[in-house]
Amino acid sequence: MLLRRLCPALALLLPHAALAQVAETATGSLTIVQPLTITKDADLRFGSIVKPWTTGSVAISTTGARSVTDGVQALSAGDTPQAARFTVAGAGGRALSIQIPPVITLSSGTHALLVTTTSNLTGALAAQVLSGSPKTAGSLEVRVGGSVALASTTQPGNYTGVLTVSAAYN
């Protein structure tokens, strides 16, 4: 008898209980893009120069043109001056960050020269975009030049160093 009396009471509570629980759905998605690659196309080469009697500098523009200042004399013999060139390839139209060190060191034995780098990229290095459109291949050419200050105390030698350029999708 008690059960008959409780059942109508329970029936009245059920619609209210249903309102206390709600649900919504979401969809999942995943976009897979081509991995980034970076290829060195050319090394940074300042060519051969004559040590200055006082001070001076040698520079390579991002187009590969060499310029010298003050007491530095450029020689036509030796390595042909050129900017470093890299090709970054990946998913077209994608934003990426390029990392170029602001300074690299060239060494000859115990002697070192600092190269202040420059690049052909416009805007922030962290806001570059690959050519092309989504779902196609894209690329970006990165050219790096630089300048070296020289003094009368700079030792003659073959100075070499490493320039590392890297890229990552944003």
Image (spheres, helix red, strand yellow):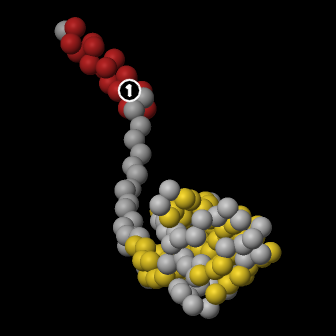
Q: Nearer the viewer, residue 165 or 59?
A: 59
Q: Tag 1's secondary structure?
A: helix
Q: Position of residue 138 (x, y in %)?
A: 48, 81
Q: Is residue 15 visible?
A: no
The residue identified by callout 1 is 17
Task: Give the residue displayed 51% in from the left and 72% down from the top.
Answer: 158
Q: Residue furthest bottom?
A: 76
- Image height of 7 relative to 21, above or below: above
Q: Quadrant of residue 11?
A: top left
Q: Nearer the viewer, residue 87 or 168?
A: 87
Task: Give the residue displayed 76% in from the left and 67% down from the top.
Answer: 55
- Image height of 17 relative to 147, above or below: above
Q: Nearer the viewer, residue 2 or 35?
A: 35
Please tell me how crowded label 1 is: few (under 14), some (14-19), or many (20+) other residues with Cα within 10 Å: few
> Is residue 1 toward the left or the right of residue 73 in the image?
left
Instruction: Give the amino acid at mark 1.
Output: Ala
Task: Give the residue displayed 34% in from the left and 17% down from the top.
Answer: 9
Task: Give the residue displayed 77% in from the left and 75% down from the top.
Answer: 71
- Image height of 70 relative to 80, above or below: above
